[in-house]
Amino acid sequence: MAWEAQPNPNQAAYDERLGRLHTVVALKEPDRVPFLDPMENMFAYFDQGLDMADVLYDADKAKGAIRAFLNEFEPDMGHGLSALLEGQGPMLEKSQCKMWRWAGMPGDVIPRDSIHQFVEYPLLLDGEHQELITDRGAFGMTKMLPRVWGVMDAMRHFDFNAPFVMKPELNAFAFAFANPEVQQMCTELAELAGMWGKYWGDVAAFKFEVENMGYPVPYDLFAMVPFDFYSDYLRGTMEASVDLYEQPEAIEQFVEQQAEIGVAAIKANQWARPGNIGMIWMHKGMDGFLSDEHYERFYWRPFMRIVDAIIERGMIPYLFTEGRYSTRYKFLRQLPPGKCLVHFEQVDMAEAKRELQDVAAIVGNFPSFLLHNGTEQQVIEEAKRLLDACAPGGGYMFGFDGGLYGGKRENVEALYATVREYGKY
């Protein structure tokens, strides 16, 4: 079902906050610097006496904490559920997820107050590249999915490449579905479908509840850099690094194919609203990981097809650069002016402002560790330093280097108050 507008009882506040985002992206000055409420807001939960295990297994607890945070701190963008896997614990258990470790999972393998952890291992083994590129569907169903989700292990009984001698053979599939392991898998998948369907319906309903409080939740679309998909999921960092030199043609073929799939998904997305955000995390483009030649060939060119597709939908590409990124300005300057928002974790924001002031709006880089380890005065001084460097001329939204992962309450209060008052134009 496509998104349909509904009357918003707090439409004026909603429009005012969303208007600040649009003004910033257009490289202009709003009435004040807007404050980004990050999707990864753990402080909201800790402040209500919850830990991550609580919210991963009870989305209602997460909702209550988000409501309390928004009512008190009044950021310019709200957030909903799912970025921190809120409420997903039961489904992750039932699906036997192998790639994540999460708070509250059986065995308590990570602390209850920890964000979920990604376990990187190759899903594409040596010698399987041609199989993936030739028949992505068969590879995904029989190898990739079972390597991530234990519930899919029975897919090994299927052979999607069995030869058709005279006619399409039904026998092999009939015998596969008759296997008790496959039947059990189908039963569990049907149960998971019901659980996920209810969950995503709840996520959508809460998103619109937050918007009816007057806080835009503009993250309507999520995309991935094709090379990041290759490096994160298919090969892992070490193997992907070797592949850059040993089989560059295979990587190039994959990222171009993946870009086509990504563009098609963006065009088909029924929930994307014009003027809202298309989110792209940029995991493996940081300084020093790829040479300029490799970055342009394997990373930037396929990625720009994703950016262009988001813009064609009338949306704002949000580029979340991870790690140091000061050697990539020459690429970022190729972005279409006044269309994108670029998030930085570890750069000199004054330099980023100079480099991109006529190209893209910037956000980020406030050190979240300061909220844990600093004093109120240190928090205030750092906030003012960023505002002094980035706010003049517009095109700037205040945000953290990553998420809001906790901190002393007095420091968080001081930060929000400083940005609200000192950030006025």
Image (tube, helix red, strand yellow):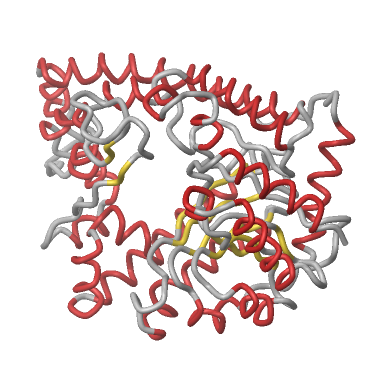
Point out residue 149 in the picture as x, y percentages from the top left corner: 23, 34
> Quadrant of the rendered structure where residue 330 is?
bottom right
Residue nearest the viewer, comparing 78 with 72: 72
* Left-right relation of 59 to 389: left
* Left-right relation of 397 to 278: right
Q: Residue at x 54, y 24 (%)?
A: 48
Point out residue 381 in the picture as x, y percentages from the top left corner: 66, 62
Residue nearest the viewer, comparing 98 with 226: 98
Quadrant showing the C terminus: bottom right
* Left-right relation of 322 to 135: right
> Quadrant of the rendered structure where residue 290 is?
bottom left
> Quadrant of the rendered structure where residue 253 is?
bottom left
* Left-right relation of 418 to 261: right
Point out residue 350 in the picture as x, y percentages from the top left corner: 65, 77
Q: How many marks?
A: 0
Q: Residue at x 36, y 83 (%)?
A: 291
Q: Residue at x 82, y 58 (%)?
A: 23
Residue 187 vertical placement versus 423 (above, below):
above
Quadrant showing the N terminus: top right
Point out residue 158 in the picture as x, y percentages from the top left corner: 14, 33
Residue 339 vertical placement versus 69 (above, below):
below
Q: Residue at x 48, y 56 (%)?
A: 281
